[in-house]
Every structure is written in C-alpha cells, then in structure tokens.
Amino acid sequence: MQPNRYINLEHNSDRLEGHPWSLFLAPCLACLAAATCFSLMNPGSSMTQQFAMPQTQVVSPVATVYSQSQVFSSNPARRTVHLMAEQTPVINTAAPTSQNTSSWFTGPIALLALFPALALGVATAILRKAQPEPVAMMAVTCAEIDAKFPPLKNDNVLRAIRGQAVDRIPVWVMRQAGRYLPEYVDFTKDKEFFSRCQNPEVACTLTLQPFERYDLDAGIIFSDILVIPQALGLDVKMIKGQGPVFTTALRTVEQWSQVEKDLLARVGVTGVEEANQTEEVIKHAPELVEALSYVYDAITLTRTRLDGRAPLIGFCGSPWTLFVYACEAKKTKTYTECSRLIYTQPELVHRILKVMAHVCAQYLIRQVKAGAQMLQVFDSHANVLPPKQWGEFSLPYLNMIAEIVKQECPDITMIVLPKEAPFALEMLASSPYDMVSLDPTLDLKKSHSLMAAVGKGVQGNLSNTIMYASPEKVEELTKEYLAEAFGPGTTLPTRYIANLGSGMNPDMDPACLGAFVKAVHSFGAK
Ligand code: 1CP
C-alpha cells in the first residue's frame, strides 16, 4: 500500500499554493542555507549566531492531516491537539545553539547574498498573485486513512450501508450530543455555541459524551451546518431562544457578488470579471474550506479518542438548506423571502447554490481525509419546496456534492436526509447516495424494500416524540415498530440503520434514549 498518498500531496500543495509568502520565503531560506554552509566552512563566522533559524527537524515522514496553520500554530493548545492525535510529533523545533561570535565580516557578506534572493522572492510572490493555481487533488481510499487510526471494533453501521450482514441493528440519533444531557449543559454553560465548534478539544468532548451513557453504533462530530456560511464570510450567530441569526439577509446579486469578491481576495485573486467570478470561486473551493481546519482537527482528535468504538460521521447542510438560512436570516414560519427569490431570481439562487455545493463537497472531502468514516448531508429545509422545485433547487446540488466527493473518495458512504419531504425518497433512488434518512411520515417497510431493490438503504424513522413516553414505553414502541417493518427477528435486516426521524430535544429524558438503543439492539437477539 502507498501510505498517505493524498495527504502528502495536500501537505505540500497547501504549503506551496495556498500561501504566496511561502514562495517568497523559499529563496530566502535557500540563501540562508547557503550562508549557513559558508559559516560552517568558516568556523569563526558570526553568521551562525546572526542568521541561524530554529531548525525544523522532520522526525516522522508521516504527513499530517492537519493544516499548515495548525502545524505552525503559535497557539499551544492547538499544537497539543496535533501531538495527541498524531501520537508521534511530526515537527520539532529546536532552538539555535551556536554562540560563536569571533568574525565580523561574514555577516555583511551573507546580507549581500540575501539581496538577489529577496528580489527573486518578491518576483515570485507577484507572479503567484497574478496566476494563482488551485490546490491539486488526488483520489484517496478509506483504507489509506484507516491506517492512521485505531482499528474499528464495531463496523455495523458501515456494513449496514454497504448491504453486508450485521451483528445487530446499528443505531445512533441526531443531536445525541445536546442539551438533553445534563453533562452537556454543565460543560457548555460558559461556552458560546460556535466557540464550542471551533475548539477541537471541546467538540471532541461533546461528541464523546453520549458514548459514556449509551452503546451507540456511530458518533457524529459536534459541529453545525452553519459553519459553512460562516466560512463564506457571512456573519451568523446562535442566539438563545431564537436559533441562528444572520446579521444581513442574503437576497441580492450585488451582495452575492461581493461575497464572491471577498472570497477570491482571501485566496489572493483580484480583478476577475463578474462573468467569470463564480467559476473562479468554485476553482478555489479546496483552498477556501481550509478556513474550517478546526472541524478537521476535531474529527482527527475525536476519531483517535473514539478508539474504534464506532465510526465517526462527518456532515454538512445541503446547499438549499444553507441558502434558506442565509436568505431568511432568522427564524421564519412562512419562508417568504427564499420562496420569492426562487420565482423572481432563479439565476441568482442557482448561482449561490452552485458555489455552496462545491464548497460543501470540498468540506466533506477534507472531513474524510481528517478521519470521518461516513458522511451525512442534511437537507433540513427540503420541506419548504414543492416536489418539482425540490427537483430543481435541491436535488441537483445534493447530487453534485455526492458526485464530487465520490470522485475523490470513491469508497466513502453517504447518507442524505431530505427532512419532511417524503416525495424525495423515490427521486433519490437513482442518486449517488447510499442511504436516505427517512422522516416519520414514511412507512419503514415499504421505503426499505424500495431502496434495497436499487442497492441502497434507509435510516430512521421513529418519531422523536416517542421520547416523551416513559423509558418502558419507549422500549415497547421501538420493538413494535421494528417488528412491523422487519418481522419477528429471525433475520437481521441489512441496509438499515435505526434512528429517530429528527433530533433529541432539550426536554427529553436521557433514560428514554437508553431504552431506544437497548430495544433496537435486542431485535433478533437470541
Ligand atoms: O449530536 C449531534 O447531532 C451534534 C452535532 C450537530 C448536528 C449534526 C449539531 C449541534 N447541529 C447539527 C446539524 C444541524 N444544525 C442541523 C441539521 C439537523 C436538523 O435538521 O436538525 C440544523 C438544521 C442545524 C441548525 C441549527 N443548529 C439550529 C436551527 C434549527 C432550526 O430549527 O432552524 C439550531 C438551534 C442549532 C444549534 C445546535 N447545533 C447543535 C446543537 C447541539 C444545537 C443546540 C444548541 C445547544 O444545544 O447548545
């Protein structure tokens, strides 16, 4: 096996193509190296003291899945994460040791040698600015990434998605890390919502909390679908009692054009004609999603600490759902503005959705490379669109995401959740997704047969309102529900993951989730 083929490549390309300064610095460092050699040949030289840099010593050839910003982070907390997750330090920084000061003339000679290097560096940086190149990409298999982490001891979720035999029906639930858990409330009381997502240690702790209580078959990384709009430069805050609120609603061509310009400026591209702007942003999506390196770090750390107990799910929101949040700006019952826009300015909506889809795809690819073992795309606002419009404004972009992701990560499995849009199931039967997460309005048995016939699976879909019953009743209702769909338990179904139709609410009893998990696992038990 070729170890870490992709990661090595990205490591390098990140360095060379992501940051013009590194091109500027390269010739300077080369010159310094030459000057250092000169000084070594002249033991009395003062240069070793004047110009010697801290030595960067590559201890392990294992390329890091971390971004460069983290490797060279000045923040000790982030560096600690890096060391813990990698287990072997990748880069050591040693302090300069020479104290020799005997010669006075070699310093000026080295300075003279620096001038051509500086000129070369400036020229390269200017050229780099004029002709930016997108980050190179290469396919990566799950096995290559798996080799970096502890072996998986419970792969029932992955087996279920692939249609292989399972030891038990696998189960996890949405918002399994959330406010219904007293330990979540306690741990997060002094931490603003997005700061929890941005701190890999915190995100990891929250993701693992439900594993202390329940025998879950999958974890989902603690984050939020709204980190993408944030990474695109839109200002969104999570306000207690209101949910996500955008400072400015995204509704006009001028606003979106400015968003694109700002994104291009971030990767050093300016002066692009309006007509080419969107394509240019799409080309740079792999660099743009590096703004979310904290999510990748959280994934790497969490998968390491999960220690193979269960696979870790990476996720994102669908382009349509993200657009709805950005366009409406705050909670709405009527979805007036986004509905108006699809009928009055469909080109603008498609333009935004296309960029979102490319950014989401690159974001998911990076999550896989950081350690996510399967992916879920949440189309939580699918219900806002009538079936025909869903087929125009959501489905093509959901498919675009899965196609791009699978081109680069061919064996990653993907689930899509079209929330409260039962019509979407059939439309997704011919999509690249491996599984559809069902809402409670759909019949589990029929949906499972429909999808299994085309080599796909289903997830869900017990109404989360059963969690308001007693734990004993939850157990009884869950057993009844599974028996209705899959019979008395003489054979275990595959291509099925048990889940609720939607997430855990803050006022639900943690004991009820325990009862649900236990009842699912008891299906077919001898
Ligand atoms: O265990 C987990 O599921 C935690 C990780 C997670 C996930 C997968 C969170 C943390 N959010 C999400 C996805 C998410 N975020 C979705 C898709 C799932 C769904 O449809 O419910 C959506 C729509 C959001 C947006 C969001 N995040 C809202 C708005 C919901 C709405 O009605 O419009 C809100 C209130 C949040 C906050 C949030 N995100 C996550 C949690 C645990 C919370 C609650 C805040 C808290 O507990 O402190």
Image (cartoon, helix red, strand yellow):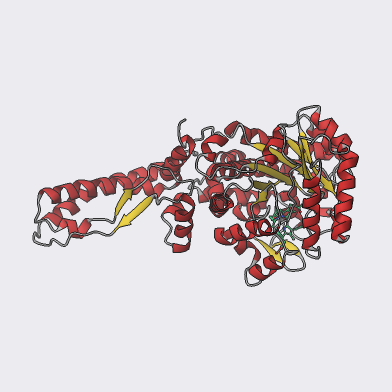
- Asked whether, in this view, residue 188 is left or right of residue 111, the answer is right
**123, 51: nearer the viewer:** 51
* Residue drawn at point x = 10 percent, y = 60 percent: 104
Number of numbered markers: 0
Residue 341 in view here: no
For the C terminus, the quadrant is: top right
Direction bottom: furthest residue:
190
Query: x, y (%) of residue 398?
Result: 72, 39
Q: Quarter containing ligand 1?
A: bottom right
Figure quadrant of residue 436: top right
Query: x, y (%) of residue 144?
Result: 52, 36
Direction front: furthest residue:
526
**234, 408: nearer the viewer:** 408
Query: x, y (%) of residue 208?
Result: 63, 57
Q: Is residue 355 above or below residue 180?
A: above
**205, 361: nearer the viewer:** 205
Figure quadrant of residue 204: bottom right
**127, 247: nearer the viewer:** 247
- Asked whether, in this view, residue 57 is left or right of residue 390, the answer is left
* Residue drawn at point x = 71 percent, y = 44 percent: 377
- Asked whether, in this view, residue 325 is left or right of residue 366, the answer is right
